[in-house]
Amino acid sequence: MRSARVAFIIHSVEQDQTSKMTGVRKIKLGSQGLEVSALGLGCMGMSAFYGTPKPEPDMINLIQHAINAGVTFLDTSDIYGPQTNEILIGKALKGGLREKVELATKFGIKYDSDAMEVCGDPAYVKYACEASLKRLGVDCIDLYYQHRIDNRLPIEITMGAIKELVEEGKIKYVGLSEASASTIRRAHAVHPITAIQLEWSLWTRDVEEDIIPTCRELGIGIVAYSPLGKGFFSSGPKMLEKLEDGDFRRYMPRFQAENLEHNKIMYERVNEMAEKKGCTPSQLALAWVHHQGNDVVPIPGTTKIENLEQNIGALSVKLTPEDMAELEAIASADSVKGDRYGAGIATYKDSDTPPLSSWKA
């Protein structure tokens, strides 16, 4: 008993020393033993959806800078590129960096005849995992998410294949992205879910009604993607002036003129509050996510080291109960106009699956 306590103390001291050296603390994600940096790095925009893929040497430098700064929780997916983002991260992790990171990737969206298709078939799960392992250049994936839920077959069928990957040592922990509360419960009954990835920010709060409470009831960690409103809280409507023609944000409902005029009011109020707090609006928006609890890890994406450093700085922004109340008022239900995505993009609202009793293999 004494040796276990000594080991715990040593571990705690080492963690504290690491936090002091890097400025980014480690936290437990979920209930299965995974520990990650309190701030993650979303890597999608380096290779996909935000215009032209960025120069590989610059992005490798950015990823390695993040790791050395203590941001060790890296998030990618096989659909980013497609596939090229995983290859990029694999290159960045050469030279002994693999052991310093918590590596998360995803499966479940594939291109078929130039169209995206959600797929959770067991054979595809196995195929996708093997392909990701090869592209990343690793023997095991730390956290493997189902990127979108295939609502054509029971979630238990997909989870059965994922569970086998854990048993085979190819993945350590399991996650779901954009899953409904009922789907989370059913999946968790097959194999413990470590993390749920969902969009959560000052302007996306619908998940607070049902999904967040479900995660906390089951001891599941929460990974918040797009915590800066897909860049909106960095510069407000001005961000649109910098977007390339191929950047998919140009076509998102919240960035359309009829909604943007209303939505900029939220940015202006956040900006005013940030000036009083002595931080940037993006740091304030990110700090709000951090203050939601020690079970929440935001994974903002960036392609610039200066923005990464600014995101790390958000960890030092302290919000009082009065600050949180002010932000709650700013981010009220009627503060945002426009859906998160356009028609045809799968979200948790489309993720309920048929009952297992209806399934015929």
Image: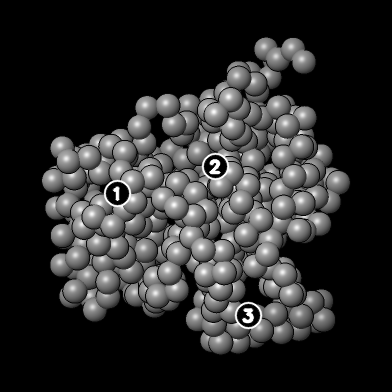
> Which type of secondary structure does the marked residue at label 3 adopt?
helix
Q: Position of residue 132 (x, y in %)?
A: 71, 48
Find out whether the residues at labels 1 and 3 contact each other: C-beta distance under 8 Å: no
- Figure quadrant of the N terminus: bottom right
- Residue sitting at the far right: 168
For image coordinates 53% across by 28% down, the residue present is: 115
Tell me if 211 is positioned left or right of 330 in this view: right
Q: Nearer the viewer, residue 114 or 301?
A: 114
Q: Position of residue 68 (x, y in %)?
A: 59, 79
> Which type of secondary structure does the marked residue at label 1 adopt?
loop
Q: Distance between the Cα atoms at labels 3 and 2?
A: 29 Å
The residue that disc 1 covers is: 203
**Residue 253: mark:** none
Q: Nearer the viewer, residue 251 or 164?
A: 251
Estimate how packed mark 1 is, as few (under 14), some (14 to 19) or many (20 or more) residues with alpha carbons within 10 Å: many
Q: Nearer the viewer, residue 21 or 11?
A: 21
Label 3 sits on what residue type?
A: Gln
The residue that disc 2 covers is: 177
Estimate how packed mark 2 is, as few (under 14), some (14 to 19) or many (20 or more) residues with alpha carbons within 10 Å: many
For image coordinates 60% across by 19% down, the residue present is: 152
For image coordinates 76% across by 37% down, the residue present is: 127
Find out whether the residues at labels 3 and 2 contact each other: C-beta distance under 8 Å: no
Estimate how packed mark 3 is, as few (under 14), some (14 to 19) or many (20 or more) residues with alpha carbons within 10 Å: some
**Residue 15: mark:** 3
Can residue 96 be seen here? The reply is yes
Label 1 sits on what residue type?
A: Trp
